[in-house]
Amino acid sequence: MANISRDTYNRIKHYVSVRLQQGVPLVDADWNEMEDIRRFELQAFLKWYVGDGVPYGDDGFRISIVYDRADFYISTGRCLVGGWDVMNDGLVERQTDGTWVATTERYPIQYNQQRLVKEVDLWQAWGVARMDKFTTPPTDTPRLDLVYLDTWEREVNDREDPDLVNPAISIPTCVRLKREWVVRVAPIVDANLTDFAVQAESFLQELRDQSDPQYQGHAYYCLARIEWDGNSDPVFVDLRRTGISLIDLERRIRVLERRVLAPAFAPQNQFTPREAHPETPVTIAGSNFDIPGLRVLFGTVVAEVIGTPSATQIIAKVPPTLPLGNAIKITVTTDGGSIVSDESFTMKWLAPTFSGSQFTPSEGLVGATITLTGSNFNAPGLVVKFAGTLAQIAPNTTPSATQIQVTVPNLPPSDPVIADPTITVETVGGRVMSTARFKVTSTQ
């Protein structure tokens, strides 16, 4: 054990720093408490805000079978366990000076190549639970094994690592704390595939609750399940949580936002109508439309939103500057994301139509003002005729999409067809003729 005066770190006091004072000696307890505070802060952050598992882009501690079934591979890499960054550098070799170093190539280590397995008395020197070689179950004996990671920290002094001696003065320097790990296997008795996860976690919790010093200060993590049916090769099931890191956390948050907040079009009938002329209200159906920052585009042209959108519906006007006849997509963007419609919208001037009574009054003098009722009257190229005779738009009026006011043209009443004419409305979108007839009661 290291020659330490006392251990003053107490997590319950919530100290976050050690501050030097003038004229006050710096002792080893102060230095060590400062380091313990720093380590606890980092470990707590990783444990509670990142969690256990294999970091994004790594494949550490993956368990896989070897050819002889009586062993398995432990892949190189890293794994977070209880806030500790545990690293597997792969197969290591013992040097002539007694030290251990990783091989040039990062080969995965096998279970039976672990030091605690190969060096039968090492577990006593390190003060940890004993390790035995991996064994397979007898023939015709099904079994479920839990493969788990056991990690802890221990002191290393100059007797184990000669580099800790200052060669200039031949005096040992400070001792070091080293993070050790070992992969262990435990049969989970009476477990089945349905409750294996619960039984495995219960087993690890029993280890954490042990009062024996061999288990104190250890952290554990499930790596894999081995399924033996008693005859064929075992099945290795990966239990690791992979892809964790702050980088991946940001990516996962973006995925969550897209699922929870991003706008989405309805699977069918994403908007109606599918064809319309400028300024026509288009109803867009979907979800998450009530998130702030709403913007609707027809192609690349921003559309005016009518009223207040709901979570499932937006009403937007067709922009007047859209090109005619082109099939375009509608894009909905909010602070939660952006979505482009699968269906296409076509901007076109629709043919005018009459509706209701078609026009009022139904008869009148030449020069009188009558009102035509229908739809799509506001397209370019508007022409209104009474039995082929051009009618003028009534003074001080402007045709709307549903209404036109015109003056009755000068028609001779002697001809019955002309005296009771039909009315036609024509625009660039098409032409429509009234089914009702207007009666001209007199000439000017």
Image (cartoon, grey):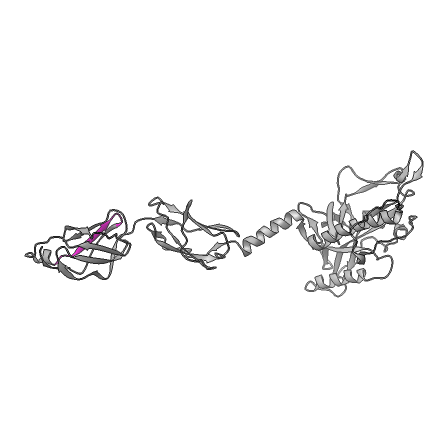
Q: In the picture shown, does residue 437 fall above or below 335?
A: below
Left or right: residue 400 versus residue 84 is left
Left or right: residue 30 versus residue 293 is right
Left or right: residue 193 versus residue 360 is right
Can residue 217 be seen by looking at this rendering? yes
Which residue is situated farthest in the bottom direction here? Answer: 190
Q: Is residue 422 covered in magenta?
A: yes
Q: Residue at x 32, y 48 (%)?
A: 348
| Closer to the camera in the image, 221 or 46 | 46
Q: In the picture shown, does residue 100 fall above or below 145?
A: above
Magenta-highlighted residues:
420-429
Q: Residue at x 17, y 62 (%)?
A: 362
Q: Position of residue 358 (x, y in %)?
A: 22, 60
The number of numbered badges drawn on the structure is: 0
Query: Which quadrant holds residue 402?
Result: bottom left
| Closer to the camera in the image, 437 or 270 | 437
Left or right: residue 256 versus residue 231 is left
Q: In the picture shown, does residue 61 fall above or below 231?
A: above
Q: Position of residue 310 (x, y in %)?
A: 46, 59
Which residue is situated farthest in the left direction here? Answer: 414
